[in-house]
Amino acid sequence: MTHPYTTRLSAPPSGAPHPLRRVIGLFAAILFLAAAAADARWERIPEAVALLDGAEPRAGALELDLPTVTQNGSSVPLTVRFPESRGENETVEALYIFAPGNPSPEVAEFSLTPALGNGELSTRIRLNQSQPVVALARTRSGDWLAGTREVRVTVSGCITANQDNDANAMQPRARASQRVRTGQLVDVRTLIRHPMETGLRERDDGTVVPERIIQSFEARRNGETILSARFHRAVSANPYLLFHVDPRTAGGTLELTWTEDTGESASATVEVPSAP
Amino acid sequence: MKHGAFNRRNALKLMGTGGLGLLFGGAAVRGSASSRSGRVVVVGGGFGGATAAKYLKRISPGLDVTLVEPAKRYYTCPFTNLYLGGLREFESLGHGYDELRDRYGVRVVHAMAKDIDVSGKKVVLEDGSELPWDRLVLSPGIDFRWGALEGYDEAASQKAPHAWKAGPQTHLLRRQLEAMEDGGTFILVAPENPYRCPPGPYERVSMIAHYMKTHKPRSKVLLLDAKDVFSKQGLFQQGWRDNYGDRIEWVGRSDDGRVMRVDADKLEVETEFGTIHKADVLNVVPPQKAGIIAERAGVTDETGWVPVDPATFRARRAEDIYVIGDATEAAPMPKSGFVANSQAKAVARAIAAELAGLDPIAEPGWANTCYSVIAPDYGITVANVYEVHDGELREVPGSGGVSPMEATPAFRSREAAYAEAWYAAIAQDTWGTRPA
């Protein structure tokens, strides 16, 4: 079977562009524009439009690592990578994640300091259906970056029965890699046991389990906040966050605090090795 | 369909709708399609490949079909857990190719396919000889991503077996279990999705708990999992409690079950948040990818698996190459032997239709049935039917499900018997093996 796009075209003897080539060039241009438009998903998310306030983000500048297909929408691993920065002004100070196909599009927001070394962030999110996941980031100089990734979801993640009991809720864990390699960031893994009730789940008797989530996370060093996060209900149960710290400038003890929407909080500490 | 419109094309459409159609339509096309010729090479003689070769010949006896499989006797990964538990003899999991060769006229070549010449349309065997094809079917199963889990490479698997392919690894694990002192700890490390046989790790710990209950009653099982949810979870956990009390401990990802590093010499593993677990027998199911020959054919993507056109299972990255079984990205279909067998039949129909110059199958369909044996008289199952909807594979709504949570011991016992019958039936369908 021959596909149209595998058909080879020969140029006319004059060397002038084959008329078909021009047509194909036009098609290519249209395809390019279509691809650019497909990436501009934030334009259809009112919360993102409000955030940008007229600014035009650099599409494709953020790299989103997500599975192409997931069979468990209740816990989809997500990693966001930032473009390499030439100097502190180009490092990211704010990151916003959206899932526009969810009942509410906001997933999480992060406020980042240079102590994080512009390193990647990983978490686990809920996706209600197949949809694009959109990330927007603002650099310290005020530039906006964007990234989009389509995910196919075969089992919805928002009303999946929660098998957790609350016995272990609010128990935190944290660990920093103790191996420091020259020029590399140290990874810090954090997790707290929590049901992250979406407020969408019904009990057998038809009553709705009220929303109850971990709303914020903060990492402090010497009393100064180096990372803060706002979680929405689309962050998976047992919120997981992997971030990085620059061991040349930010080694030492990190104090971590998770706060529930009830106001209750839990904390932990983690030792980040220092590097010269 | 109107009466009287029962021609070849409609027969093929009908065949695409499911198993009944297959049996019926297979006979209907035989007469006319047998005059067509074409060379089809099938690489891999497991559930997918053996079924594809057989059904190609059943549908179009005139096709020249060659099956490439190194083993003269193929041992199935399904039911190796029952061997480990002491419920089956290993030899009962072996199947030959006599029926494919003698009854269906498949040419069986016992050699390893070393490379695929895509543009020249040839399979290159390890001795350098070549098999030309008009259509190629790859059913290569899985290979392991050695080193993707720190400390776990091929050498480490000689001390901490994976036993995720039937053969020497299965025997090694069995010998280690037999040599273990009573009171020892067996640890199984389960991977993140996707991997071969989603319920496999959970059936394995069930069967090992059964072995312990009968031979080493003071021993324990620890299952360290990179996932928070798994296949037939509620049924497995209930079955573990019913049959083994607290002998099996499952630790999910959010309780620090995700293993990040393996030390095969010390039989130790280290989890994401730094807990060290020491085993007496360590069974690591490592991260996986499509069988290596799929990489050689250039049909895998960055995930390591093979993206396929959902209606035909033609590889997205090559013309005239079809891929089936565990190697494919076919979610929500699981990587199971039954699915490979089901995909093989659909691919045989698609290739037979194409080589006969007929329209593609209008509405292809697939099915899956997975039995898991928790104890000798305690079985559970999951079943589903799949279709293409809006250009993507999906479960037919309401088509399947799992065993009920509330069931009598007699019900569970019947499902264990059905599991044995399931194995006998699919082995007969795939290799022609008659039940002993």
Image: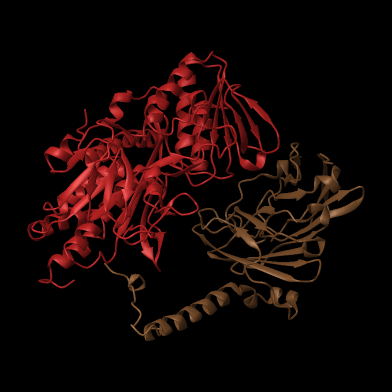
Chain colours: A brown, B red
Residue placed at 45% from the left, 81% from the top?
A25
Q: Going by the picture, which residue comes out furthest to the right?
A: A223
Query: Is B160 or A107 nearer to us in this picture?
Result: B160
Q: Is residue A265 left or right of residue B361?
A: right
**Residue at 12 percent of width and 71 percent of height:** B3
Can you name the residue that lies furthest to the front here? A14
Report if residue B25 is visible in the image.
yes
- Vertical arrangement, residue A203 with respect to residue B408, above or below: below
Quarter of the image where one finds residue A54? bottom right
Residue B225 % position (x, y): 57, 38
Q: How many marks?
A: 0
Relative to B381, is B261 on the left or the right? right
Q: Quadrant of the N terminus of chain B?
A: bottom left
Q: Position of residue B402 (x, y in %)?
A: 43, 46
Counting from the top left corner in percent of width and height, residue A65 is at 60, 56
The structure residue drawn at horizontal position 65% and vertical position 35%, both measured from the top left corner, is B271
Residue B118 placed where, x, y %? 32, 54
Judge whether B381 appears above or below A51 on screen.
above
| Front-most of residues B10 and B117 | B117
Residue B215 higher or lower than B120, as above or below: above
| Residue A262 seen in render | no
Indicate the quadrant containing the C terminus of chain B: top left, top right, bottom left or bottom right: top left
In the image: residue B412, left or right of residue A111: left
